[in-house]
Amino acid sequence: MSAAILPLREAIDRFVNDGASVALEGFTHLIPFAAGHEIIRQRKRDLHLIRMTPDLIYDQMIGMGCARALTFSWGGNPGVGSLHRLRDAVENSWPHRLELNEHSHAGMAAAFCAGAARLPFGMLKGYLGTDLPAHNPNIRRVACPFTGEMLAAVPAINPDVTILHAQRADRAGNVAIDGILGAAREAALAARTLIVTVEEIVDALPPAMNGIVLPHWVVRAVAHCPGGAYPSYAQGHYARDNAFYRKWDTIARDRAGFLAWMNQHVLDTPDHGAFLASLQKDAA
């Protein structure tokens, strides 16, 4: 069965429910900002957000009250500093309390891989000499049944919904991703529902040399969304807007300034195209 090609608004409305666990993956590029903004516009609440490296889009979602919990392995504004809305939620419970489930990158990767394989947990040689197990009860130890070696174990991650951004999909819903993958493939295969926003929809996918193809039978919905990873980059389409990341540090420090920016550029815009236009107008 082919994946449905839907407007982003409809895909989020249909498949992202309040209380769901949601992974918006992407590693340095192809970060699904447009989908995150649509979740904010639809005022989805009580979400368990999952992401190996939460950055600006999770700062925005947390600050706008979408999240009750965060599973992650690093959080920050890359190359700039802290995520101020994430810090405010953790330190001051604003806009409300945020539950943290922190892992190492290797632990998150093992958990996604286990989820993709439909195994109950993942194993790794890790967490030795760290205090994470003392703060995260989901990090445990198991003995290898063959050697007796003690290994770290983490529960599988199976998001209710994974959302990715990619360069292209064909009309049947097969999705091609080029460039750095991070945990995108594993998060996609671990999910109960997979939504992908894409730069373009084509009649046929080009050869996937040094890339991957997610076949249509693992994809629930595809949404055509040019520029959907901005301000991160999409290899072969546009560069990262480093100035935006620096500017965000100032915007996010102050609650009132943050809310004003989000109202102007996200809540008061109907879609991602209008969001991009509002930024251009603001910069003029």
Image (cartoon, grey):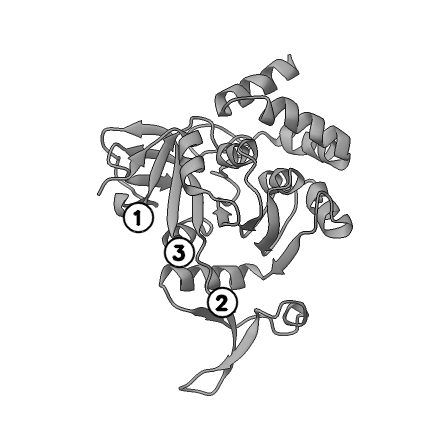
Answer above or below: position of 125 versus 203: below
What residue is shown with label 1?
Answer: 218
Answer above or below: position of 194 versus 244: below
Residue 194 rendering spot, x and y as whole percentages? 38, 45
User: Disc 2 residue type?
Assistant: Pro
Answer above or below: position of 128 versus 242: below
Residue 34: image tag: none
Residue 155: image tag: 2
In this image, 76 relative to 176: left or right?
right
Q: Is residue 3 visible?
A: yes
Decide which of tag 2 and tag 3 comes sooner along the chain: 2
Residue 265 rendering spot, x and y as whole percentages? 61, 23
In this image, 114 relative to 58: left or right?
left
Q: Nearer the viewer, residue 217 or 228?
A: 217
User: Disc 1 residue type?
Assistant: Val
The quadrant holding residue 247 is top right
Indicate the secondary structure of the residue bearing disc 2.
strand
Total numbered labels placed on residues in the image: 3
Q: Which residue occupies the extreme top position in the image?
A: 284
Q: Quadrant of the C terminus?
A: top right
Do the numbered discs 1 and 2 sit on residues whose CB atoms are within 8 Å? no
Indicate the secondary structure of the residue bearing disc 3.
helix
Do the numbered discs 3 and 1 sit on residues whose CB atoms are within 8 Å? no
Indicate the secondary structure of the residue bearing disc 1.
helix
Decide which of tag 3 and tag 1 comes sooner along the chain: 3
Q: How far apart, in angstroms, are the residues tagged by discs 2 and 3? A: 12 Å
Q: Is residue 179 visible?
A: no
Q: Quadrant of the N terminus?
A: top left
Do the numbered discs 2 and 3 sit on residues whose CB atoms are within 8 Å? no
What residue is shown with label 3?
Answer: 190
